[in-house]
Every structure is written in structure tokens, then in C-alpha cells.
């Protein structure tokens, strides 16, 4: 028993300290769904509604429209896509840091949505990839190129952007049906460097950007009902497909928002959203769970899995839940039914301020 306690204390002492941040905003660049109209359903989450967050463009000077000088164009609204990309900006003691969490499924969508939103990519200091799946890594090379190009004319220019990835990159991933079905490959390490980034490989917990962000290592799989992707496979060095259901390279990112608690970002929750949340609380050293943002991967879950996930999430007492991407409409309905007033789903193209 003494040895076990000593080991736990040693493990706790090795977890880097996460600094409190004064403010936190989330710009959802890519998500499966968009909604520029609905109001925020939660008082702790502030975002524009009724198209008020949509970019406006000036009318040509020779156009007369009853005194209107601005117009909202449909080609300035973001497109939804199967994937996730969140630009997270925090401030601490008057200094801001911006981290890009995942890059969506393809370069064209990332580039288009960033351009339509009028974002300045030069402010992005670090890209963190949650896991090696194309719907999270597909826009990475475009993101790096846009970041580096924007630095040439920006007063906010940072040094070379860092891409933070798990070192275990599969050649290919896929699904075993009646035969192997391959997914597109993720960007290679060589391609990432050629695009202009510095690669930081880590499978251990660490902090970044003045300790305002914590990135986990592999997430412990403890619940009996969160088993990863059924029939998931990966292509090994021997040229064979092998079982790969657990996606052990998946990592979470989290911040500690002053006066609120842990803001946890999860790409797909292949580890299980309950495992993700519990591990975040463990890494946070007792700081309460404030919210979980991102994909909960329950779109194809059984009714029993959805119910158990909801019960265990509810027991963690989050203030607000912000599901997106692969969560699925059934689990969102279940949250609203069982935890009324707790949900504020995320949508592509919308900027969220936690207040």
C-alpha cells in the first residue's frame, strides 16, 4: 500500500502545472454542422445569433439600396464539413495566446472558412493534432502555409509555428468491412516540415504557451463500455492490416479558466468522453470540470452506451457541455432531456466566449 501511494504521489508530481487563464474564446473554424441563427442556450456561453456574427461586405459605391452600405453575402458564410478545427485564444495578465486544435478534413475547407471569417492566421502559435485521422489532420498543410504566409505582412508575427503531434503516426488507418477499407493518409512528418512548421512529437503530458494549455499523453481506457472504433484497423510496417480499435494516440487539450474550472477539448473521444473527462480532472489536480468541447463520438453508439455515458458525465457535474462533430443528434437530445439547460452545442463558423 505504501508503495502504491508513493507511486501515485510521484506520478502526480510529474504532471506539469497548468496556469489559470483570465479569458477564453473558441472560434469554431470547422464542424460538421453550422447554425448562424440560433441564440446561445446557456448563459455561460456567449455567441452571435441571427447572422449577427456573419461577415459584412461594403456595397459598391454606385449601387443604391435605400441607404444600405453593407450587405451579407452567402459566399462569406462558412461551410460545414465532417471534421473539427477550433482556434482557441486565451489571455493571462494581458497577454494572449492562440492554439489551433485540429485542422478539419481537407485543405480547401480550412482555407475557405478562415478566409471567409477574416481570421489572421499569423496569431496561431501552435497546432495540436488530437489524433491521426484525416478528418482532423486534412487541413494541416494549408493551415501551416497560411500561417507562415500571413506572418510576412502581420505585426503579430510569431516564430515558426509548432505542430504538436503524437509520434505514433500510422501509414494508413481504415475500417474492416467485408474487406479492408482504407482512409486517406494523414500528412507525413516530412510534408509538415516542408510546409514550414517545426514538429514537436510527444506521447507524454506537457504544457505549452506559458503553461496556459495542457496537452495529455495517451488517455487511460477504464470504462467497460467505451471501446473505441469497432473494426478499426491500421496498416503496419509488414504491409498488413491489423486491429486498431482503441486509437491510443488520441490526446486531449485543456485550459484552466479562472473562476470556472477545466475547459477540456476533445477531437473525437475515441477513448470515450467519460474517460477523457475523468483523465482531465485527474491531470487538473482536483480543479472542477467546467466544460467538454468537441466530438463525443456517440453518433453510432448503442442506446445502452449513450445512457451510461450520460449518467457518468452527469456525475462529473460539468457546468456546460459543448458537443460537436461526431457526437450525434441522439446524444444531444439526451443531454437536453436529462440535463436541461446544460448544453451549448458548437457550430462551424461561430465564435464562442466563455463568460
Image: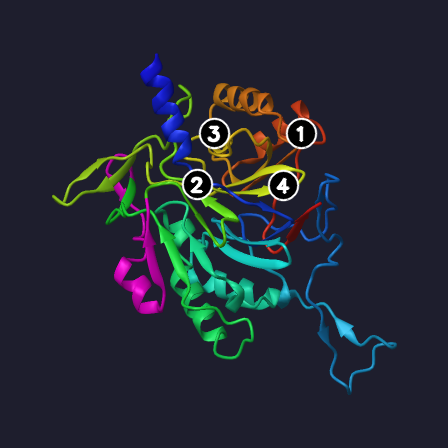
Please tell me how crowded label 2 is: few (under 14), some (14-19), or many (20+) other residues with Cα within 10 Å: some
Tag in front: 3 or 2: 2
The Cα–Cα distance between marks 2 and 4, rounded to whole angstroms, is 30 Å
Pointers 4 and 3 in contact (CB under 8 A)?
A: no
CA distance for labels 4 and 1 = 10 Å
Q: Quadrant of residue 198?
A: bottom left
Q: Earlier in the sequence, mark 4 or mark 1?
A: 1
Of mark 1 and mark 2, the one earlier in the sequence is 2
Residue in the picture at 31% in, 65% down: 193
Residue 315, above or below 351: above
Per the model, the C-alpha gap separating discs 1 and 2 is 35 Å
| Disc 3 element | helix
Residue 8: x, y in percent?
Answer: 38, 24
- Sequence-first tag of 1 and 3: 3
Which residue shows up at 36% across the image and 29% down it? 10
Asked whether residue 220 is in view, the answer is: no
Which residue is tagged 2?
16
In this rendering, the label closer to the viewer, 1 or 2: 2
The quarter of the displayed image where residue 107 is located: bottom left
Is 198 part of what is drawn in magenta? yes
Q: Is residue 265 visible?
A: yes
Residue tagged 1: 336
Quadrant in which the C terminus is drawn: top right
What range of the chain is rendered magenta? 175-202
Q: Residues within 10 Å of mark 3 (few under 14, many from 20)?
A: some
Question: Residue at left 50%, top 35%?
Answer: 296
Residue placed under numbered mark 4 in the picture: 345
**270 drawn magenta:** no
If the image is split into quadrants, where does the N terminus sit? Answer: top left
Q: Mark 3 = which residue?
A: 282
Q: Secondary structure at mark 2?
A: loop
Amino acid at each position: 500500500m505504501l508503495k502504491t501511494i508513493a507511486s501515485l504521489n510521484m506520478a502526480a508530481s510529474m504532471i506539469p502545472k497548468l496556469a489559470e487563464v483570465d479569458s477564453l474564446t473558441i472560434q469554431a473554424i470547422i464542424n460538421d454542422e453550422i447554425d448562424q441563427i440560433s441564440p446561445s442556450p446557456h448563459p455561460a456561453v456567449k455567441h452571435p445569433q441571427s447572422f449577427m456574427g456573419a461577415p459584412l461586405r461594403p456595397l459598391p459605391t454606385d449601387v443604391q439600396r435605400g441607404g444600405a452600405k453593407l450587405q451579407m453575402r452567402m459566399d462569406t458564410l462558412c461551410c460545414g464539413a465532417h471534421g473539427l478545427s477550433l482556434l482557441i485564444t486565451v489571455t493571462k495578465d494581458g497577454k494572449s495566446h492562440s492554439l489551433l486544435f485540429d485542422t478539419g478534413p481537407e485543405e480547401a475547407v480550412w482555407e475557405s472558412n478562415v478566409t471567409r471569417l477574416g481570421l489572421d492566421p499569423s496569431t496561431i502559435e501552435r497546432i495540436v493534432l488530437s489524433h491521426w485521422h484525416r478528418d482532423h489532420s486534412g487541413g494541416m498543410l494549408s493551415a501551416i502555409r497560411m500561417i507562415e504566409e500571413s506572418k510576412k505582412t502581420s505585426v503579430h508575427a510569431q516564430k515558426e509555428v509548432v505542430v504538436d503531434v503524437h509520434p505514433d503516426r500510422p501509414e494508413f488507418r481504415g475500417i474492416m468491412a467485408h474487406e479492408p477499407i482504407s482512409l486517406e493518409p494523414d500528412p507525413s512528418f516530412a510534408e509538415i516540415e516542408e510546409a514550414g512548421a517545426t514538429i514537436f512529437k510527444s506521447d507524454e503530458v506537457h504544457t505549452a504557451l506559458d503553461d496556459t494549455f495542457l496537452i495529455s499523453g495517451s488517455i487511460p481506457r477504464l470504462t467497460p463500455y467505451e471501446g473505441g472504433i469497432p473494426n478499426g484497423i491500421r496498416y503496419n510496417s509488414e504491409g498488413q492490416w491489423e486491429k486498431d480499435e482503441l486509437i491510443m494516440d488520441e490526446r486531449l487539450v485543456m485550459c484552466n479558466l479562472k473562476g470556472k474550472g477545466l475547459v477540456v477539448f476533445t477531437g473525437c473521444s475515441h477513448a470515450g468522453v467519460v474517460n477523457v473527462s475523468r483523465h482531465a480532472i485527474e491531470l487538473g489536480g482536483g480543479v472542477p470540470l467546467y466544460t467538454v468541447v468537441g466530438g463525443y463520438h456517440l453518433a453510432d453508439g448503442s442506446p445502452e452506451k449513450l445512457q451510461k455515458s450520460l449518467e457518468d458525465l452527469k456525475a462529473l457535474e460539468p457546468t456546460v457541455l459543448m458537443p460537436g462533430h461526431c457526437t450525434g443528434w441522439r446524444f444531444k437530445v439526451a443531454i437536453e432531456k436529462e440535463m436541461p439547460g446544460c448544453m451549448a452545442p458548437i457550430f462551424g463558423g461561430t465564435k464562442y466566449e466563455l463568460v
